[in-house]
Image (spheres, rainbow, N blue to C red):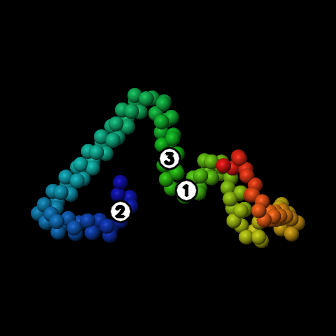
Amino acid sequence: MFANVGWGEMLVLVVVGLVVLGPERLPGAIRWTSNTLKQARDYISGATTQLRDDLGPEFDDLRQPLSELQKLRGMTPRAALTKHLLDGDDSWLSEAFASPEEKPHSAPPPSAVTPPPPPEPLPPGTPAPYDADAT
Protein backbone atom coordinates (compact mmCIF):
# COMPACT_ATOMS: atom_id res chain seq x y z
CA MET A 1 0.00 0.00 0.00
CA PHE A 2 2.86 2.36 0.78
CA ALA A 3 4.99 1.19 -2.14
CA ASN A 4 5.34 4.71 -3.53
CA VAL A 5 6.13 6.34 -0.17
CA GLY A 6 9.83 6.60 0.54
CA TRP A 7 11.69 7.25 3.76
CA GLY A 8 11.76 10.98 3.15
CA GLU A 9 7.98 11.14 2.87
CA MET A 10 7.57 8.99 5.99
CA LEU A 11 9.86 11.34 7.90
CA VAL A 12 7.82 14.34 6.75
CA LEU A 13 4.62 12.58 7.88
CA VAL A 14 6.09 11.86 11.32
CA VAL A 15 7.28 15.46 11.72
CA VAL A 16 3.87 16.80 10.67
CA GLY A 17 2.23 14.34 13.06
CA LEU A 18 4.47 15.56 15.88
CA VAL A 19 3.56 19.16 15.16
CA VAL A 20 -0.18 18.56 14.75
CA LEU A 21 -0.83 15.89 17.39
CA GLY A 22 2.04 16.41 19.76
CA PRO A 23 4.48 13.85 21.13
CA GLU A 24 2.01 12.42 23.67
CA ARG A 25 -0.78 11.56 21.16
CA LEU A 26 1.35 10.55 18.15
CA PRO A 27 2.08 6.93 19.25
CA GLY A 28 -1.64 6.31 19.83
CA ALA A 29 -2.51 7.77 16.43
CA ILE A 30 0.10 5.58 14.72
CA ARG A 31 -1.21 2.51 16.57
CA TRP A 32 -4.83 3.34 15.63
CA THR A 33 -3.87 3.89 11.98
CA SER A 34 -1.93 0.63 11.74
CA ASN A 35 -4.76 -1.34 13.41
CA THR A 36 -7.32 0.23 11.07
CA LEU A 37 -5.21 -0.60 8.01
CA LYS A 38 -4.72 -4.18 9.23
CA GLN A 39 -8.46 -4.56 9.85
CA ALA A 40 -9.31 -3.16 6.40
CA ARG A 41 -6.80 -5.53 4.80
CA ASP A 42 -8.39 -8.47 6.68
CA TYR A 43 -11.89 -7.43 5.53
CA ILE A 44 -10.76 -7.19 1.93
CA SER A 45 -9.00 -10.56 1.98
CA GLY A 46 -12.05 -12.13 3.66
CA ALA A 47 -14.36 -10.68 1.03
CA THR A 48 -12.08 -11.94 -1.73
CA THR A 49 -12.00 -15.42 -0.20
CA GLN A 50 -15.78 -15.47 0.19
CA LEU A 51 -16.26 -14.29 -3.39
CA ARG A 52 -13.85 -16.95 -4.64
CA ASP A 53 -15.74 -19.62 -2.69
CA ASP A 54 -19.15 -18.43 -3.91
CA LEU A 55 -18.23 -18.03 -7.57
CA GLY A 56 -15.91 -21.03 -7.86
CA PRO A 57 -14.20 -21.29 -11.25
CA GLU A 58 -16.06 -18.23 -12.55
CA PHE A 59 -13.95 -16.08 -10.22
CA ASP A 60 -10.96 -16.47 -12.53
CA ASP A 61 -13.12 -15.37 -15.47
CA LEU A 62 -14.01 -12.26 -13.48
CA ARG A 63 -10.38 -11.54 -12.61
CA GLN A 64 -9.08 -11.83 -16.19
CA PRO A 65 -10.56 -8.51 -17.48
CA LEU A 66 -9.45 -6.80 -14.27
CA SER A 67 -5.89 -8.03 -14.73
CA GLU A 68 -5.93 -6.78 -18.34
CA LEU A 69 -7.05 -3.37 -17.10
CA GLN A 70 -4.23 -3.42 -14.56
CA LYS A 71 -1.75 -4.09 -17.38
CA LEU A 72 -3.19 -1.17 -19.37
CA ARG A 73 -2.60 1.23 -16.48
CA GLY A 74 1.14 1.09 -17.08
CA MET A 75 0.90 1.57 -20.85
CA THR A 76 1.01 4.79 -22.76
CA PRO A 77 -2.20 5.66 -24.62
CA ARG A 78 -0.57 4.88 -27.97
CA ALA A 79 0.60 1.46 -26.79
CA ALA A 80 -2.85 0.62 -25.42
CA LEU A 81 -4.56 1.64 -28.65
CA THR A 82 -2.17 -0.27 -30.87
CA LYS A 83 -2.40 -3.34 -28.67
CA HIS A 84 -6.18 -3.54 -28.65
CA LEU A 85 -7.27 -1.84 -31.84
CA LEU A 86 -4.44 -2.81 -34.16
CA ASP A 87 -3.42 -6.13 -32.57
CA GLY A 88 -0.03 -4.69 -31.69
CA ASP A 89 0.86 -3.74 -35.29
CA ASP A 90 1.67 -0.04 -35.33
CA SER A 91 3.99 -0.20 -38.33
CA TRP A 92 1.74 2.03 -40.41
CA LEU A 93 1.94 4.71 -37.71
CA SER A 94 5.71 4.64 -37.45
CA GLU A 95 6.18 4.57 -41.25
CA ALA A 96 4.09 7.70 -41.71
CA PHE A 97 6.34 9.71 -39.41
CA ALA A 98 9.68 8.19 -40.38
CA SER A 99 12.28 10.34 -42.05
CA PRO A 100 12.94 9.61 -45.75
CA GLU A 101 16.08 7.59 -45.04
CA GLU A 102 14.20 5.43 -42.49
CA LYS A 103 11.18 4.65 -44.67
CA PRO A 104 10.94 1.15 -46.15
CA HIS A 105 12.11 0.77 -49.72
CA SER A 106 8.89 -0.94 -50.90
CA ALA A 107 7.27 2.40 -51.78
CA PRO A 108 8.13 3.99 -55.13
CA PRO A 109 10.48 6.97 -54.99
CA PRO A 110 8.74 10.36 -54.70
CA SER A 111 9.85 11.38 -58.21
CA ALA A 112 7.96 8.43 -59.77
CA VAL A 113 4.64 9.53 -58.30
CA THR A 114 3.04 12.28 -60.35
CA PRO A 115 0.68 14.63 -58.57
CA PRO A 116 -2.80 15.08 -60.06
CA PRO A 117 -3.16 18.08 -62.34
CA PRO A 118 -4.60 21.18 -60.69
CA PRO A 119 -8.25 21.89 -61.52
CA GLU A 120 -8.85 24.49 -64.19
CA PRO A 121 -10.31 27.76 -62.97
CA LEU A 122 -13.94 28.48 -63.77
CA PRO A 123 -14.73 31.29 -66.17
CA PRO A 124 -16.03 34.47 -64.53
CA GLY A 125 -19.75 34.46 -63.80
CA THR A 126 -20.03 30.64 -63.72
CA PRO A 127 -21.51 29.28 -60.46
CA ALA A 128 -19.40 26.90 -58.46
CA PRO A 129 -20.21 23.21 -58.84
CA TYR A 130 -22.72 21.88 -56.30
CA ASP A 131 -22.32 18.49 -54.67
CA ALA A 132 -25.56 17.27 -53.08
CA ASP A 133 -23.78 14.47 -51.22
CA ALA A 134 -21.37 16.88 -49.51
CA THR A 135 -24.12 18.95 -47.86
**In this picture, residue 64 sits left or right of residue 51:** right
Q: Is residue 31 visible?
A: yes
Residue 88's x, y, as percent? 65, 51
Residue at 75%, 55% in the rendered image: 129
Residue on which disc 1 sits: 77
Residue 95's x, y, as percent? 72, 62
Helix, strand or loop at mark 2: loop
Residue at 16%, 65% in the rendered image: 20
Considering only vertical position in the picture, is 91 above or below 48? below
Q: Earlier in the sequence, mark 1 or mark 2?
A: 2
Helix, strand or loop at mark 1: helix
Mark 1 or 2: the one toward you:
1
What kind of residue is marked 2? Val
Residue on which disc 2 sits: 5
**In this picture, residue 17 sits left or right of residue 109:** left
Find residue 5 and report its image quarter.
Answer: bottom left
Q: What is the spatial separation of the Cα atoms under label 1 and label 3, in whole angstroms?
A: 13 Å
Q: What is the spatial separation of the Cα atoms under label 1 and label 2, in whole angstroms?
A: 26 Å
Mark 1 or 3: the one toward you:
1
What kind of residue is marked 1? Pro
Residue 51's x, y, as percent? 39, 33
Q: Earlier in the sequence, mark 3 or mark 2?
A: 2
What kind of residue is marked 3? Leu
Q: Nearer the viewer, residue 79 or 18?
A: 79
Q: Is residue 105 visible?
A: no
Residue 70's x, y, as percent? 48, 49
Residue extending furthest toward the right: 112
Helix, strand or loop at mark 3: helix
Residue on which disc 3 sits: 69
